[in-house]
Image (spheres, rainbow, N blue to C red):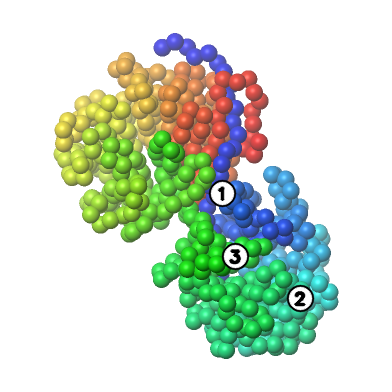
Amino acid sequence: MEPVTPVSIAWHRGSVFCCLPKMERGVVKVLGGDPKGNNFLYTNERSVIIRNVQNPAIADIYSQHAHPAIVAKYSPSGFYIASGDSSGKVRIWDTTQKDHILKYNYQVFSGRIKDIAWTEDSKRLAVVGEGRSSFGSVFLWDSGSSVGQINGHSKVINSVDFKQNRPYRMATAGDDFTSVLFEGPPFKFCLSHTDHNKFVNCVRFSPDGSLYATAGVDGKIFLYEGTSGSKVGSLADDKAHSGGVNAICWNSDGTHMLSVSADKTAKVWDIATRKAVTTFTMGQDLLDHQMGCLWQGQDLITVSLSGYINFLDQNNPSKPRLIVKGHSKSIQCLTVHKTKDMNKIFTGSHEGGINQWDAKTGVCESFDGKGHTNLVSSIGVEDSVGDLVSCSMDDTVRFTNINSKRHSAGDVVKLNSQPRCSALGSGGHVIVLLVDKIVLLKDRKYGIGIEETEYEPQAVSVHPGGVTVAIGGSDANVHLYSIEGNSLRDNQQVLPVKGPVTDLQFSPNGNFLLVGDANKVLTVFSVADGYKVENNYYGHHAKVVAVAWAPNSQYFASSGMDTIVTVWTLGNNENRLKMQDCHPLHHITALTWIDDNTLVTTSGDACVKQWDIIHGKMCPHMGEDS
């Protein structure tokens, strides 16, 4: 092979398709809103997600928390975000720069933070939750100095809010069925109400401060005078919802309120008449419980227990105008399917969900019907019939049409043990690796595979010619097989590598076999030269997790447990590009190429990211946020 002339490789971040909120049954999801109405906030594990209201595909991620982030709120100035986590720590960070520089960091109490509120001058913060010695704190944002005490509760405080004009008031709501009003600063107890007979989930002041409202698990919403705290009344004659009310939010002029409930509905209320003027029925499934809401300008946003983000349409309450879908748990595998009209990205997640993404717009569509019930370990598209073939830890292989995107009971092949992964061949062949055997499927039926192996199969790839199958084992060898009709034959050829195989792939042109191993080494074999070693590639600091060839077969990418993605040039070990912190919190679980200049990665952060790779230009290295 002729030597490759050294060239530079540069990169910068392309599109980011963000994760959905991390949801728990019975746990309210608090959303934060940009005071300008442009963005909204939510959390997933250790990340805070900033999404554009008008185009939710535009997103940014803050990932500096050491513990799972629970809630994030913009300051009224819009220059800072305060986010709290499960350890009781609040981080205040800049919103105007991509680096999101940390301004202040406070350990407010020891326990889960459940809500945060700012005063209108962006100088004071109130933080409440599950503290051990106290359930809340109110302090100056720039020094942490206390500006009052939050007392009057005997159990966890779920919610807090400030009256956004003088005289200042602060209200809290908790698990002791109580809401408390404070006056200040310094803030001190004023009065409490016990109108609710179950947990109080949410308290919010109207924008003009004339009223504040509380919402509880008892399905009731009460209104109180904003300054004195005297009771004004309730929404609806008895219950506002037939289920617990999880969250409430006022519109900008305080004339209407949005509420969401475990009864799977959202309602818009006219405050003057205290009647519901619009009711949105979100579905009949458990996952249609409405867990959080936000009213941003003209946009009404709710979050379902599924994690789906719903943009409601008051003119058509029977159907949201937009549902933002995605994953809320770790993505384990992905593949790309190219059509004349669009490039589609398919991803499979830890909980068994499969999604389709438009690579250009980021629009996500989920698959309907009852699909996998456990981790999806590998997916691929069988072009000849338009089927997405997926294997899962639920001991099944599924064949789902990518046009209908609907799972059906008749498109499943049951396995007798958990599969590790699978690979597609031509002519309806699917190779599935189990713990100690290799299964061959032909047109969704069992063929003759390998009943018992002397090694543990770990990874598989089928040659583009459709005959040769390479299987990497924990014995630090690659074993070669051949597909003959509906049977798999052992070629009795073994290719040793430097460590237990973690992933492998034939190049698109069929000339090379790329193998990654647990000893941090990449080995490329030349198929035409009888699988002679072309080169070993070193550079990862931990075991290799995934490998992928570019369509031109001249470049390949690898990811490792070191969280680094490396783009390599075939035949030139030195001409490589290291991409650090592509997914800062987790290692990359899977990667693939859309074209020679676009790499796609997924990770445990449940996000899909695209990277623009620039070959052959003497341009400086560009970082993730360039």
Mark 2 against mark 3, which lies toward the viewer? Answer: 3
Q: Is residue 464 visible?
A: yes
Q: Which residue is mark 2?
A: 209
| Discs 1, 3 touching: Cβ within 8 Å | no
* Residue 65 point in image, percent of width and height: 63, 54
Q: Amino acid at mark 2?
A: Gly
Residue 94 vertical position relative to residue 196 in the rendered view, above or below:
above
Q: Residue at x 52, y 29 (%)?
A: 597
Q: Residue at x 64, y 84 (%)?
A: 273
Cα–Cα span, label 1 and label 2: 34 Å
Cα–Cα span, label 1 and label 3: 17 Å
* Residue 96 point in image, percent of width and height: 74, 48
Cα–Cα span, label 2 and label 3: 21 Å
Which labelled disc corresponds to residue 57? 1
Mark 3: secondary structure: strand
Which labelled disc corresponds to residue 381? none
Q: Which residue is mark 3?
A: 300
Q: Residue furthest front?
A: 315
Q: Is residue 189 left or right of residue 527?
A: right
Q: Amino acid at mark 3?
A: Leu
Mark 2: secondary structure: loop
